[in-house]
C-alpha cells in the first residue's frame, strides 16, 4: 500500500475518494487499522474517556499524548498518523509549538489536531504550519469546550451559529490547516462546510456528505461503556473479528453507506 501523505489527502478530496479515519491508542490497534487499509489513524485525546475512564478529555496531558502517539506509530507503516493537542497545550503559540515538536519528534505523528478557531488558535495553526508541522483543525462540538457548552451538545443548529461555523472553517483553512474535523453538527451544515473548503473535511456526527469520516475505535466496536452515541455504529455486531469490523467500517465509509441518515442530526 502506498503511504498516505498530507498532500495526498487533498488529492483524495479532488478525486472524490472518501477518507477513512479511526482512532487508535496502542500498537495492536494501530496494526489492525494498518491491515484494514485505514487512511488516517488519530491518537485522540478521547483516550482520556475511553482508555483512562474520565468523564471528559480535559485531564489528558501532553506527556500522555506523546506516549500513546509513540505506541501507535510503532504499529503503522502506510497509515497517516495524526495526534491531538490536549487541553491547554494550545494556550499560546509557544506551548502549541512545543506540543507540535514533541508529537512529531518524539511521538512520530505526521500532523497535529487543534480544537477551535479562536484568534490564538488561528495564530497557533499558522505558526505550526510555518514550521512544517501540518495541522488538522477541529470544529463544531469540540469536546475540550464541554464546560463552555454546558455538555456535549450539537453545535451550529441556529442559523447564525451555522454561519459562524462556516466562517471558522474558512478561517482555519486560511491560517494553513490542511484538514478539518467537524463534529456534532446538523448533516446539512456538514455538507455546507465540506462544499465551502478546498481542504478535506472529516465528519463525526456531521452527516454523510463530508470528504471522510472518523469514529472512536471503541465506539465502532461496541465496547465503549454506556449508551452508543447516535452518530456511531457497532461494526463488530454480526462479525467475528475486530479486523472484519474495521474492514467493514472502511468499506462503508468509502462507498458512502456509513453514515446513514439515522446517524446524523437534523
Ligand atoms: O479525540 C478524538 O477521538 C477526536 C475524534 C472524535 C475526532 O478528536
Ligand atoms: Na480529540
Image (cartoon, grey):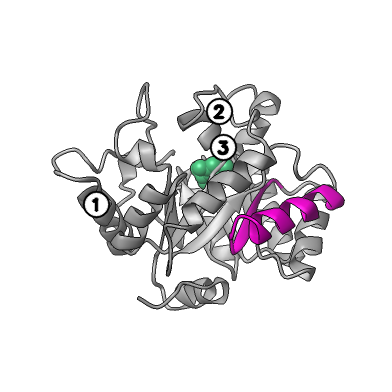
Whether residue 221 is visible to the viewer of this picture, yes or no, is yes
| Residue assigned mark 1 | 243
Q: Position of residue 55 (x, y in %)?
A: 55, 22
The residue range painted magenta reads 93-116
Please rate how many residues cluster around mark 1, counting C-alpha atoms within 10 Å: few if below 14, some from 14 to 19, many from 20. some
> Which of the 4 image quarters holds residue 225?
top left
- Closer-to-camera residue (13/128): 128
| Residue assigned mark 2 | 152
- Closer-to-camera residue (102/141): 102
| Residue assigned mark 3 | 157
Q: Secondary structure at mark 3?
A: loop
Of circles 2 and 3, the one toward us is 2
- The residue at 34%/49% (across/down) is 259
49 over 17 or under it: above or below: above
Q: Position of residue 61 (x, y in %)?
A: 67, 36
Q: Secondary structure at mark 2?
A: loop
Considering only order in the chain, which callout, 2 or 1, is on the residue closer to the N terminus? 2
Q: CA distance from mark 2 to mark 3?
A: 14 Å
Q: Quadrant of the N terminus?
A: bottom left
Is residue 251 within the magenta segment?
no
Whether residue 183 is visible to the viewer of this picture, yes or no, is no
27 over 105 or under it: above or below: above
Instruction: Kindly check if marks 1 and 3 are in contact, taking CB atoms under 8 A apart as contact.
Output: no
> Which of the 4 image quarters holds residue 155?
top right
Q: Position of residue 113 (x, y in %)?
A: 63, 52
Q: Determine which of the numbered discs, if any, sits on residue 5 in the image.
A: none
Amino acid at each position: 500500500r502506498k503511504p498516505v501523505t498530507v498532500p495526498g489527502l487533498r488529492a483524495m478530496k479532488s478525486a472524490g475518494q472518501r477518507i477513512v479515519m479511526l482512532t487508535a491508542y496502542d500498537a495492536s490497534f494501530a496494526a489492525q487499522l494498518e491491515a484494514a487499509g485505514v487512511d488516517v489513524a488519530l491518537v485522540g485525546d478521547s483516550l482520556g474517556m475511553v482508555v483512562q475512564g474520565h468523564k471528559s478529555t480535559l485531564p489528558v496531558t501532553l506527556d500522555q499524548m506523546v506516549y500513546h502517539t509513540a505506541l501507535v506509530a510503532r504499529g503503522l507503516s502506510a497509515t497517516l498518523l495524526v495526534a491531538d493537542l490536549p487541553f491547554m497545550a494550545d494556550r499560546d503559540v509557544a506551548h502549541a509549538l512545543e506540543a507540535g515538536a514533541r508529537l512529531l519528534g518524539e511521538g512520530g505523528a505526521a500532523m497535529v489536531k487543534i480544537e477551535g478557531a479562536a484568534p490564538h488558535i488561528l495564530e497557533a495553526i499558522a505558526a505550526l504550519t510555518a514550521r512544517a508541522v501540518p495541522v488538522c483543525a477541529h470544529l463544531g462540538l469540540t469536546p475540550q469546550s464541554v464546560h463552555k457548552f454546558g455538555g456535549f451538545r450539537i453545535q451550529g443548529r441556529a442559523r447564525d451559529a451555522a454561519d459562524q461555523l462556516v466562517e471558522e472553517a474558512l478561517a482555519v483553512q486560511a491560517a494553513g490547516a490542511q484538514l478539518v474535523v467537524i463534529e456534532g453538527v446538523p448533516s446539512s451544515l456538514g455538507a455546507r462546510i465540506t462544499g465551502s473548503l478546498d481542504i478535506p473535511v472529516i465528519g463525526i456526527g456531521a452527516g454523510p456528505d463530508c470528504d471522510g469520516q472518523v469514529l472512536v475505535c471503541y465506539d465502532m466496536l461496541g465496547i465503549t461503556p454506556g449508551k452508543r452515541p447516535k452518530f456511531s455504529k457497532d461494526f463488530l455486531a454480526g462479525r467475528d473479528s475486530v479486523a472484519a469490523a474495521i474492514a467493514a467500517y472502511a468499506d462503508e465509509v468509502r462507498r458512502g453507506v456509513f453514515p446513514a441518515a439515522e446517524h446524523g442530526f437534523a
